[in-house]
Image (cartoon, grey):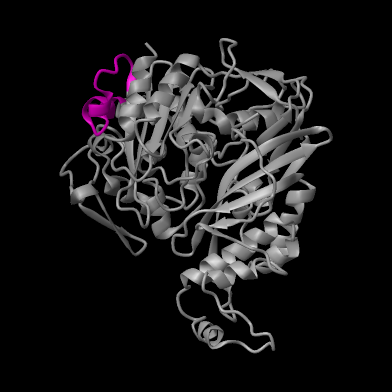
Amino acid sequence: MGNRRNATEGRRTRPVVLGGVIAVVVGGAGFGAYALLGGGAAAEDGTRTSSAAQAEDARTGPLSAAEVTGTAERFLTAWQAGKVKEAAAATDDPKAATALLTAYAEDARIKDVTLTAGTRTGGKVPFAVKGTVSSGDVGKPLAYDSALTVVRRAGDGEPRVAWQPAVVHPELKEGDTLVTGEAGTPPVKALDRDGEELTTAAYPSLGPVLDGLREKYGEKAGGEAGVELRIVRGKASKKAELSDKTLLELSEGTPGTVKTTLSPSLQAAAEAQVAKKERASVVVLRPSTGEILAVANSSHGFNTAFSGSLAPGSTMKVITSSMLIEKGLASMDEQHPCPKYFTYGGWKFQNDDKFEIKDGTFKASFARSCNTAFISQAPELADDDLTKQAQQVFGLSMNNWQVGVPTFDGSVPVQSKAPMGASLIGQGGVRMNPLNMASVSATVQSGVFRQPYLVSPEVDGRKLATASRTMSAGTLAQLRELMSYTASYGTAAEAMAGVSGEKGAKTGSAEVDGQKKPNGWFTAYRGDLAAAGVVQKAGHGGSTAGPIVAALLKSAG
């Protein structure tokens, strides 16, 4: 299960083709081709030629074209010929290279490898891989593209391939391995809420989701494993919530069946919406149950919507507002400070375009997303107040959600001084994703936290996460009014125009170091639907993520 490349017909082993020059192996890993490409060569008596001496003198400077192509050729030719030690010696980490290249042949069972280098760009050399994956009497062709980078080795400046697992296969991370054999888990056939099969052909975003479903339910869904080439994730990848991934299926297993909560119409609409923008992600929930109705990302390799860890910007003010109201530090119709600047913990905070609201209410500050209105209350707060509010009321930052696939459950760490002030407006150390922020809107809409889920807990008897308390009726009423006012008259009004019925929204823009434009966030609800989205490096949430979220709320009727 999961995304798979279409394999093309394999070929018998042949010399590496590098930039149009055929690499000829002469008594070792391609030294003949290295000479043809202009590299230095050793004299018969072991002394170095003048050109070699000049090359040695230059080993502290930029890499020459000959050094890059010659090093790449030596590595690729040796790898293609199955000379693992020679290939590893052409890298800057022979031990790690030896281990992975050995496993490539022995564990992944990839043979008859042909490597064809493309056009060099600086120190980078792309190359195409073709081979055959075999297991018993079954064999299938494998084809994919990869790349290597040549650098100067630390210490002596010798040109070497910068070793990383992605050289062997672009989807390999540190600690991952390639394995061919009986699948670790049987395949699963994932169904939408109406009983129809979910596929990546129909819904391109669902690759990581389908991989995660197989990992969790493959053994439980009643299927039988087939034989496949797959990536088995190591510790680092598992920590990053990456699932094992099938690259090539040699023989089909018998899939079990797993029913999800996804709505086919909303999923299709979500896919269409995120496709309009780069780096966009969105999630739609049903507040009354916690069911996930849609999840989509414009980039299909990583499920940012579920596993992203991004500063949520001013959408975090929904949580902060509930805390300030509970503590008596804010009330929607009472006057509340919104100065141009507020200094706390040695940091000088300001509002977008340095605006201020004179003699305004907290409702006005929320609707216009006044940063200083929130940070001005930091001196009255304990370091752990926001963390407790996120955990106890909104069910976040406890790493205990049981969604049915891997997720990041948000993080609101205890901070002090300036970082604590920044966390009140969704910066500092606070990290969220669209799943988390859709859940925040769902909690406001329904009045109680219900853990989002993709597979019903009745399928496997797992226990869903809960919050330890709910907001008071008065706090909840004010929070709903703040979000409703923002959806009709505040920063979310343009995006939410045309969204009828009971509604609420909050925009967000999260500044990220090194980015010219902030990440745009938007979270909202309408009736028994809640949604949140982010568009990275795009600008303000109202004009970037807002239209995506609003379109999905409208499309549901």
* Vertical side of 473 occupied by 67: above or below: below
Say left or right for 20 vs 348. right
Q: In this view, which residue lies farthest toward the left?
A: 358
Which of 281/362 is in front? 281
Q: Residue at x 75, y 20 (%)?
A: 254
Q: Residue at x 60, y 79 (%)?
A: 41
Which of 77/251 is in front? 77
* Vertical side of 425 occupied by 273: above or below: above
Say left or right for 323 vs 302. left
Say whether residue 15 is magenta.
no
Rendering coords of residue 145 (x, y %): 56, 46
Say left or right for 548 vs 497. right
Q: Quadrant of residue 328?
A: top left
Image quarter where the C terminus lies is top left
Does the rendering let one see residue 243? no
Rendering coords of residue 31 (x, y %): 64, 70
Q: Quadrant of residue 10?
A: top right
Which of 418/300 is in front? 300
Say whether residue 491 is magenta.
yes
Bounds of the magenta segment: 484-503
